[in-house]
Structures are given as C-alpha cells and as structure tokens.
C-alpha cells in the first residue's frame, strides 16, 4: 500500500506502535533494566549510528560508562550536503558539535581508531592509547572499493565524489561555480548497494535548480551503471516537470542498460567510458566510487565476502564476534537502505539490546523505520518511508511507500514534502546531538 493513499494518522499510529519514530522513547525497554545496567561501552564513529547509539545508551543506562571515539572534531552531515553543493546552504549549517553528548555524560574522545581487536573488545587509537570495553559498538560508515573502474583511485581532486560531507562537498560546489554557462555536469553513481540510494539523483535535481537559475544553457548527464534507481518514477516525473528530462534537456539519465556499466574514467580528457565504448565528456564530473564497509571493520575481520558486516538483525551484534555490534552503512540490515535514518533507528535498537543485556534482562522486541526525503528543488520534495520488523531473523518491510509521480496536479503536496524534509533534518540532528 502506498503511504500517500493511507490515512496519515494510521501510518503515524503504526510508526508509534512499533516504537519506530526518531523520537522513540524506550523501545519497549523494561524500566528496571534502565536502572540496573552497568559496565563499559566504547562506541566508534560519531555519525548517524554511533552518535545516536552513544546518546541512547546513556539515556537508557545512566550508570553505563559510555565512551565515543570520533576522528573528526565536528560532524558534517551528508543529509542536506546536496543543498550546499547547490549553493542553497552553507557547510556551517550542516556541521554539528559533540557538546550535547558531552553534557549527557558521554566521554567523547576526538581521535582515530587504527585497530580493533574484536575478540578482546579492545580498540587502539592513533597515538598509542587503547580502550577496552564490555561491549564495542562500531558505526564507522563506508569506504570506497577502488579498482572496479579504471583510474577510480586517482580522481578525488579532479572529479570530487562528495560522498563524505566536508571538504569534498565544498570542492564540488566551487567547480560548479567556476563552470561556464553551457557546460556539462556528469554525475556517475556507484553500483548498488551504496550509501543513500536516492542521493545521486537528489544531487542531480539540486544542481539542476542551481543551473536553471544561473547557467541555463548547461546540462546534467547521469551516467549510471545501474539499470534502475531509487524513487525513479517520482524523480523522473519531477525532473520533466521542473527542468526537462531526456537527451538535449537539462537532465539526461543514461541507465546501466544503455551501454553497460561505467568501466573507465580519464581525468586528463575529463571523460567517462561505459563497457560497450560509449564515452561522455564533462566540464564538471562527480564520480562516486563503488562502496563497501569501512576499512576499520574490514581489517578487524568483521566483513563477509561481499565486503559488508553480517549481524544479528535484532541486536546488531556481529555474527563473528560476541559483544561487538556493527551499525549503519557498514552492516547488512535486511530490507533497510543505507541511510542516516536507518542508522539512527538501528542504533536505538542496539542501545536497547545492550542496556537490557547488561542489566540481565531479555532483549526488547525490535522495530525500525526509515524516511528519506529528496529535494527536487529547495521547496519541492519527494520521499520514501517505511516501517520494518524482524521476521525469521531478517529485517523485513511491513509498510511504506513513495511519493506518487504526479507533479503539476497538486504542487502544494510537493512543497509540503520539502517543508517536512527540513523538519526531519532538525528533528534527527537534535535527536543525535542534543
Ligand atoms: C549526498 C548524501 C546525502 C544523504 N542524504 C541522506 C538523507 O537525506 N537522509 C538519510 O537518512 N541519509 C542520507 N544520507 C546517508 C547517510 O549520510 C548515511 O547513511 C549515514 O551517515 C550512515 O551513518 P553511519 O553511522 O553508518 O556513518 P557516518 O554517519 O558516516 O558516521 C561514521 C563516523 O565514523 C567516523 N569514523 C570513521 N572511521 C573512524 C575511525 N577509524 N576512528 C574514529 N572515527 C571514525 C567518521 O568520521 C564518521 O563521523 C546521505 C548520504 C549522502 C552521501
């Protein structure tokens, strides 16, 4: 069933009933467990998974000793970074400090973890410090899988990926600003699975918004290796409505079925080549490399043959190391996409499971949710939303839907989606860092 056909109150009731909204309070956690849990937990990575997990461990287990290790002094969110690329927001507006987590009593260490001894539940930091714990939580995000496209490890400066928000985001923005009117922007998405399935297509949308207003003779070509993409009907209908879609129009999508996947990029000629020889030349190229779990969890021996971490999908405990939990983009989480909202939802279930275990209680019933808004322009949005439950050991979708592809009929609906996106961002970042 499409959530937009569904009574909105019923959907929110369902989110609430499953304890899945981002302001979720106790995840069905027995109150007794909250008081009794004691022990030491070390969380690595202060992003959507790690910051949320550290925060909820302390909320639900006030007596727990919680340490969060994060290599950056501040966290820059990937959500809304496409707005920075389009010149609609500053990088400062998507940068968050860890002061709120410190105020909760979490010991925040600004340092890089260089090694994980999963069997000993111990991490080593650059500089020689080592931390041991009763439980380790790892949410270090993704790493790039170089070598699948020729030259893919040589182009971060010439063809910025901007898939870790920060300096790369600013670099891509600067390249767009420097591009002459009439230029061609190539966006090259990675092959699935990857962080934020709608991300490259939201990026195309917001760059088109910038070009339409500032460099209207310019074009965007999405040179895809995938035969289909997230929210495809909704994106394509909105592109046709706002910018023009197809060859010679402002946005052109070249699917993986047309010419095969991308096999080569050449920074000296600024070209992208597909398997059967089709070549695309760009003035600005956003090449997003293929992805796998963070190098940290890989070197710790926690990944499977595909490069991702298998976990118990109820607790996020690693399948290969006891009391080591892996969250967010690095883990295999059934039907959930690799998104910040998914990581936030997984983190709460993981925190609840750890607090209950440390208090000698049984694990609470897990439940999960994800919403991904995509902005077609700053005031025109679409979304996908879903609620998930654990069934036979795997996370399965039980309800949800995508914005219907009918822009032009009722634009107020799409304008509201853009407003909800702003509310979502404010809510989830204060949930993580507040
Ligand atoms: C352009 C773009 C737009 C997006 N938009 C959305 C959106 O609208 N909604 C949404 O839900 N999701 C969105 N996402 C996806 C979202 O950003 C990720 O899914 C989410 O960040 C995953 O959370 P995580 O905890 O796994 O990793 P992260 O949030 O990346 O956190 C990992 C943290 O670990 C730290 N770290 C890594 N290695 C180490 C180490 N060795 N030592 C110490 N610290 C370390 C990193 O510095 C980082 O802070 C978007 C992504 C992109 C690229």
Image: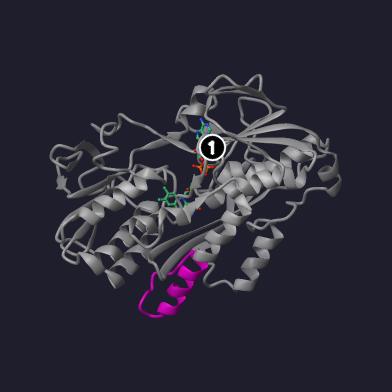
Q: Which residue is drawn at 70% across and 33% down?
A: 41
Q: Does the magenta stretch include residue 410?
A: yes
Using the rendered view, name the quadrant where residue 44 is placed.
top right
> Is residue 157 toward the left or the right of residue 77 in the image?
left
Q: Is residue 375 magenta?
A: no
Query: Does residue 251 sit above or below 301 in this rendering?
Result: below
Q: Where is residue 123 in the image (x, y as percent from the top left)?
A: 60, 24
Q: How many labels does the image show?
A: 1
Which segment is the magenta one? 402-421
Q: Position of residue 20 (x, y in %)?
A: 65, 56
Q: Residues within 10 Å of mark 1 (few under 14, many from 20)?
A: many
> Is residue 222 toward the left or the right of residue 290 in the image?
left
Q: Position of residue 320 (x, y in %)?
A: 61, 25
Query: Does residue 380 sit above or below 268 in this rendering?
Result: below
Residue marked by disc 1: 331
Q: Which residue is drawn at 66% across and 42% down?
A: 54
**The N terminus, quarter of image:** bottom right
Query: Does residue 329 sit above or below 413 in this rendering?
Result: above
């Amino acid at each position: 069933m499409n959530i937009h056909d569904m009574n909105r109150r019923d959907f929110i009731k369902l989110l609430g009933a499953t304890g899945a909204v981002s302001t979720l309070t106790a995840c069905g956690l027995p109150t007794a467990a909250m008081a009794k849990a004691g022990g030491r937990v070390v969380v690595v990575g202060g992003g959507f998974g790690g910051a949320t997990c550290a925060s909820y461990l302390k909320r639900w287990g006030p007596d727990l000793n919680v340490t969060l290790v994060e290599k950056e002094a501040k966290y820059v969110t990937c959500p809304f970074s496409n707005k920075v690329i389009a010149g609609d927001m500053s990088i400062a507006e998507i940068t968050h400090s860890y002061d709120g987590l410190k105020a909760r009593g979490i010991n925040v260490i600004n340092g890089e973890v260089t090694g994980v001894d999963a069997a000993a539940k111990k991490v080593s930091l650059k500089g020689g410090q080592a931390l041991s714990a009763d439980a380790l939580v790892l949410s270090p995000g993704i790493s790039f899988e170089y070598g699948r496209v020729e030259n893919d490890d040589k182009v971060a400066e010439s063809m910025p990926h901007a898939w870790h928000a920060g300096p790369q985001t600013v670099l891509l923005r600067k390249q767009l600003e420097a591009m002459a009117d009439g230029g061609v922007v190539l966006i090259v998405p990675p092959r699935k699975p990857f962080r934020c399935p709608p991300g490259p297509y939201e990026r195309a949308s917001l760059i088109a918004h910038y070009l339409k207003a500032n460099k209207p003779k310019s074009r965007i070509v999405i040179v895809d290796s995938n035969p289909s993409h997230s929210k495809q009907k909704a994106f394509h209908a909105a592109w046709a409505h706002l910018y023009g879609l197809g060859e010679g129009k402002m946005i052109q999508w070249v699917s993986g079925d047309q010419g095969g996947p991308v096999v080569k990029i050449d920074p000296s000629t600024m070209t992208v080549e597909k398997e059967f020889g089709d070549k695309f030349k760009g003035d600005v190229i956003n090449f997003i490399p293929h992805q796998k779990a963070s190098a940290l969890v890989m070197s710790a021996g926690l990944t499977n043959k595909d490069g991702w971490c298998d976990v118990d999908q109820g607790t996020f405990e690693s399948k290969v190391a006891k009391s080591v939990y892996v969250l967010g983009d690095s883990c295999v989480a059934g039907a959930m996409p690799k998104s910040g909202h998914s990581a936030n939802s997984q983190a709460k279930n993981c925190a609840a499971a750890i607090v209950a275990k440390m208090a000698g209680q049984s694990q609470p019933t897990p439940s999960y949710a994800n919403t991904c808004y995509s902005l077609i322009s700053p005031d025109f949005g679409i979304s996908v939303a879903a609620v998930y439950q654990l069934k036979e050991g795997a996370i399965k979708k039980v309800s949800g839907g995508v914005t219907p592809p009918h822009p032009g009929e009722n634009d107020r609906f799409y304008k509201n989606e853009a407003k909800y996106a702003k509310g979502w961002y404010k809510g989830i970042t204060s949930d993580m860092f507040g």
